[in-house]
Image (spheres, rainbow, N blue to C red):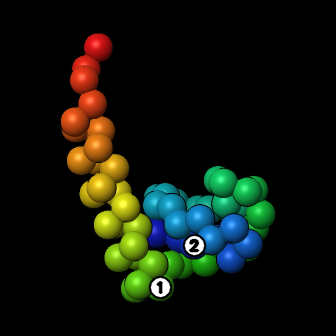
Amino acid sequence: MIYTCDKCRFIFERTGQVDSCPNCGKPSIREATPDEREEFKKNRAEAKQVNARRPKP
């Protein structure tokens, strides 16, 4: 499931129970809205492209 923190606006994905934001530690989390889920998926796809271009050690 994709969540959003209402304190720091961090959007993240987790399975199972989530008690607090992994970014700021606050318990102000909720299920992401459809727009936030789209933003998360777009950012994840961009990160995968950047990582794919990096040279491997």
Q: Is mark 2 on a helix, strand or loop?
A: strand
Dividing the image into 4 quarters, which one contains the C terminus?
A: top left
Image x and y of residue 29, in percent: 66, 72
Q: Which residue lies furthest to the bottom in this view?
A: 34
Please give left or right for residue 6 compared with residue 40 in the image: right
**Residue placed at 29% from the left, 38% from the top?**
51
Report if the CB atoms under discs 2 and 1 are less than 8 Å apart: yes
Near mark 2 (Cα within 10 A), the count class, few <14, some 14-19 or many ≥20, is: many
Q: Which residue is at the far right?
A: 26
Marks 2/1: CA–CA distance: 8 Å
Instruction: Work out whether mark 2 precedes mark 1 in sequence or the reverse, and give the earlier one.
Output: 2
Look at 62% across and 71% down and name the residue there. Answer: 9
Report which residue position mark 1 lands on: 33
Q: Residue 43's quadrant in the figure?
A: bottom left
Which of the numbered marks, if any, corresponds to residue 3?
none
* Amino acid on which disc 2 is placed: Thr
Tally the numbered discs: 2
User: Badge 1 local density, few (<14 within 10 Å), some, or many (20+)?
Assistant: few
In x, y percent, where is residue 24?
73, 57
Q: Which residue is drawn at 77% across and 63% down?
A: 26
Q: Which residue occupies the foreground of this view, 48 or 4? A: 48
Q: Which of 56 and 16 is in front in this view?
A: 56
Q: In this view, does 41 lie to the left or right of 52?
A: right
Indicate the position of residue 55 as horizontal and vertical percent values.
25, 23
Q: Using the image, tell me which numbered label, if any, was put on residue 4.
A: 2
* Residue 25 drawn at (x, y percent): 75, 56
- At label 1, the amino acid type is Thr
Question: Relative to 10, does residue 47 appear above or below in the rendering?
Answer: above
Q: What element carries label 1?
A: loop
Quadrant location of the N terminus? bottom left
